Amino acid sequence: MRRQAHRLSSWGQNVFVKIPVTNTEGISSSPPIADLTADGLHLNVTGILSLAQVRTVAESLSHSSGAVVSVFAGRIADTGRDPVPLMAATVELLHPYPNLELLWASPREVLNVCQAESVGCQIITVTHELLKKLGGLGRSLEEVSLDTVKMFYRDAVDAATSCSCTWSAHDGNETIRDPRPESALEDSGRFGVNLGSSPRCRKAPAVSRLPANFVS
């Protein structure tokens, strides 16, 4: 580990070498972390999931000129635990170490970006898919709802099924209709799709019985 770390560090002054919090047998990496820090390497200690690990790592990095502490909040959430309290506590634990930055690792949704900012994380890693979704921050929920219904409709059409109604968008500016001729629907009957549920189809008459305020 030490030899590889020095080799990676030689690539540039801006390189932060990733060091796992333990080895594959669960033995703490604190000794090599302290040694590499003393050698002047910038480290990113990764795979952290508990406050006990944060304390140990912070002590090992206390003399670093700059290091990153990566806590895998997403993996904490995968166990059914809310990661926010632990991340907030980590911020407090690292407060005496201004040379250390907290990284929120393995985010699962856009909300995690907001949570990381709110607790005071300096860094968060995000996938390309999450980056694409950041444009939706602050969108109207009604707008998202309408987009969702349109997506369900397109999925139904793509699946060679048919929505059994026509309806108008909530603002009255757009009407979505089944693109196939009425004659084709009436001649053979068709499958109706319950938008918003699992994609199971049932045999349905040409006209569905829907609430009066839903049909345009």
Image: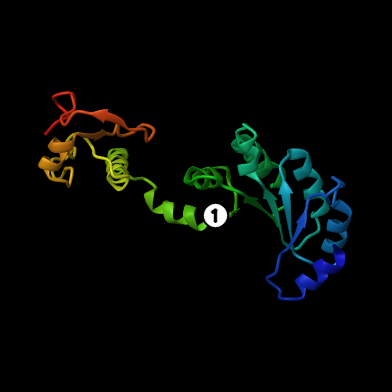
Pick the residue in front: 129 or 197: 197
> Quadrant where the C terminus lies?
top left
Is residue 157 depicted above or below 14 in this figure? above
Residue located at (13% from left, 37% from top): 187
Instruction: Please give the residue where the numbered disc 1 appears in the rendered image.
Output: 126
Pick the residue in front: 165 or 121: 165
Q: Is residue 9 left or right of residue 161?
A: right
> Quadrant where the N terminus lies?
bottom right
Q: Is residue 56 left or right of residue 140?
A: right
Alpha-carbon neighbours of circle 1 within 10 Å: few (<14), some, or many (≥20)? some
Q: Quadrant of residue 89?
A: top right
Q: Quadrant of residue 142?
A: top left
Instruction: Report the coloring of the rendering.
Output: rainbow
Where is residue 70 shown, x and y percent of the image? 68, 51
Report the amino acid beneath label 1: Val
Where is residue 85 shown, x and y percent of the image? 62, 35
Residue 46 in view of the camera: yes
Q: Is residue 152 left or right of residue 128?
A: left
Q: Secondary structure at mark 1?
A: loop
Pick the residue in front: 24 or 72: 24
Where is residue 60 shown, x and y percent of the image? 83, 52
Residue 40 in view of the camera: no
Residue located at (18% from left, 40% from top): 169
Q: Is residue 143 left or right of residue 78?
A: left
Q: Quadrant of residue 168?
A: top left
Q: How many marks?
A: 1
